[in-house]
């Protein structure tokens, strides 16, 4: 049996009764340190300051991020090393959704209800496998992909039962090193033996990276048809469609994916970006607003989401030549959040001031536009923003009886 006494565990569970029961199980196994979190935000805060050997997270955590979103964020921001074990706890009804992430999968799953004996057996097996894969994961944590490749080949030979896990890591290393032909050869080898969704996904991803968009689109579509819960295949299909300027199709795919899994910042942001391209500003505004809400206190809290949210509101006003009180208040709240999170970012603050002036020009509120311009100038004098255009005041003064052409196109932050 695995000795748990020298390992640290984090338990993420929103239900008090389940939390108490699962913590008792871990203590009974021998864990000396078991930290608990009820919500994603508190879990992420703990993970920023402590390295855990084992993380157990329920998939359903009430409102806000679910366990899968926590896993995706900690993987992308390296909040847990590859040598740590992440076990997802699910209800039977959510199992398919949890398994739907091809890119960021947990090390294992356990479905509720489960016994203490089953949990101990599952954890012991996962940690035992982690020990066998330790040389690979240590190299991955150092981003030494060449060494990781050598270790994958060695471990696969030593432990044939872990061959599939090693093949998947091996292909990821090839992609990280841009050795695309090696990756494709490996994916084809796997697919000849068995139609594994992760291998088809990887093959399509490589084809996308090689700019073979037609082939990539075909394979991503096959994944979305055959495996409806592999939601991130929808994201990559949308990227592929956008690369071919098929924006309406990309928007439809993202809307479909968000119906299945709405709590993804990246997905909401992608929908916002493609909707701006289509001048579908209402959909864009809604998507960016949701992305802002989801990104709070996360790795994804970036200025472009906020700026493009303001852009979409200004564009809505330009189409209708008016904005209602609710829309103006939403605009102000996003401005306040920009001040809170990005006060020292000169570029973002400049965009914010420009959009604030554009908003009041759009609704022909001369007094408020001049006030916003005056504040912008003061901020520029304090070197907190770049200076406004010299002719902007004249444009505002000319507002009465004349519609001013103020395109927000130039201030959309480019995103990938």
Image (spheres, helix red, strand yellow):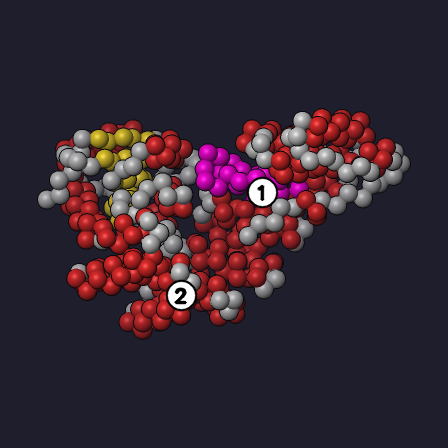
The quarter in which the N terminus is drawn is top left
Marks 2/1: CA–CA distance:
31 Å
In this rendering, position of residue 331 left or right of residue 217? right
Mark 2 vs mark 1: give the one in front. Answer: 2
Residue 38: % across, % down: 34, 31
**In what element is the residue under mark 2?**
loop
Q: Can you tell which mark lies on residue 304? A: 1
Magenta span includes 293: yes
Q: Can you tell which mark lies on residue 128? A: none
State the residue in front, 402 or 168. Answer: 168
Q: Magenta span covers which residues?
A: 285-311
In this rendering, position of residue 159 left or right of residue 64? left
Q: Main secondary structure of the magenta part?
A: helix
Kindly identify which residue carries mark 2.
Answer: 179
Residue 228: % across, % down: 42, 58
Q: Determine whether 82 is above or below 26 in the image.
A: below
Asked whether the viewer can see residue 98, the reply is yes
Asked whether the viewer can see residue 326, the reply is no
Residue 384: % across, % down: 64, 30
């Amino acid at each position: 049996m695995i000795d748990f006494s020298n390992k640290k565990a984090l338990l993420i569970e929103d239900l008090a009764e389940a939390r108490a029961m699962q913590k008792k199980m871990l203590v009974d196994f021998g864990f000396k340190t078991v930290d608990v979190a009820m919500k994603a935000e508190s879990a992420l805060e703990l993970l920023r300051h402590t390295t855990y050997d084992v993380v157990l997270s329920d998939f359903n955590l009430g409102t806000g991020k679910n366990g899968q979103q926590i896993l995706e964020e900690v993987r992308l921001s390296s909040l847990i090393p590859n040598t740590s074990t992440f076990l997802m706890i699910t209800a039977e009804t959510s199992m398919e959704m949890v398994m739907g992430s091809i890119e960021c999968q947990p090390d294992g799953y356990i479905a509720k209800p489960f016994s203490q004996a089953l949990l101990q057996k599952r954890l012991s097996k996962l940690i035992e496998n982690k020990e066998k894969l330790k040389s690979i994961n240590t190299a991955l944590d150092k981003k030494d992909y060449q060494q990781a490749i050598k270790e994958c080949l060695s471990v696969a030979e030593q432990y044939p039962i872990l061959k599939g896990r090693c093949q998947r890591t091996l292909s990821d290393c090839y992609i990280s090193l841009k050795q695309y032909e090696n990756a494709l050869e490996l994916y084809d080898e796997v697919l000849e033996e068995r139609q594994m969704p992760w291998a088809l996904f990887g093959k399509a991803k490589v084809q996308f990276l090689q700019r073979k968009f037609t082939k990539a689109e075909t394979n991503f579509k096959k994944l979305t048809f055959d495996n409806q819960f592999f939601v991130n295949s929808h994201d990559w299909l949308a990227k592929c469609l956008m690369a071919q300027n098929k924006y309406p199709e990309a928007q439809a795919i993202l809307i479909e994916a968000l119906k299945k899994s709405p709590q993804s910042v990246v997905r909401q942001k992608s929908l916002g970006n493609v909707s701006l391209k289509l001048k579908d500003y209402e959909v864009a505004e809604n998507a960016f607003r949701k992305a802002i809400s989801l990104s709070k206190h996360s790795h994804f809290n970036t200025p472009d989401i906020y700026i493009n949210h303001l852009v979409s509101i200004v564009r809505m006003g330009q189409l209708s030549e008016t904005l209602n009180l609710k829309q103006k208040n939403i605009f102000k709240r996003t401005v306040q959040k920009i001040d809170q999170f990005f006060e020292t970012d000169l570029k973002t603050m400049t965009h914010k001031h420009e959009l604030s002036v554009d908003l009041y020009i759009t609704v022909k509120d001369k007094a408020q536009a001049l006030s916003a311009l005056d504040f912008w100038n003061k901020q520029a004098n304090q070197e907190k923003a770049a200076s406004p255009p010299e002719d902007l005041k004249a444009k505002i003064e000319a507002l009465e009886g004349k519609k001013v052409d103020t395109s927000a196109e130039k201030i959309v932050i480019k995103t990938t």
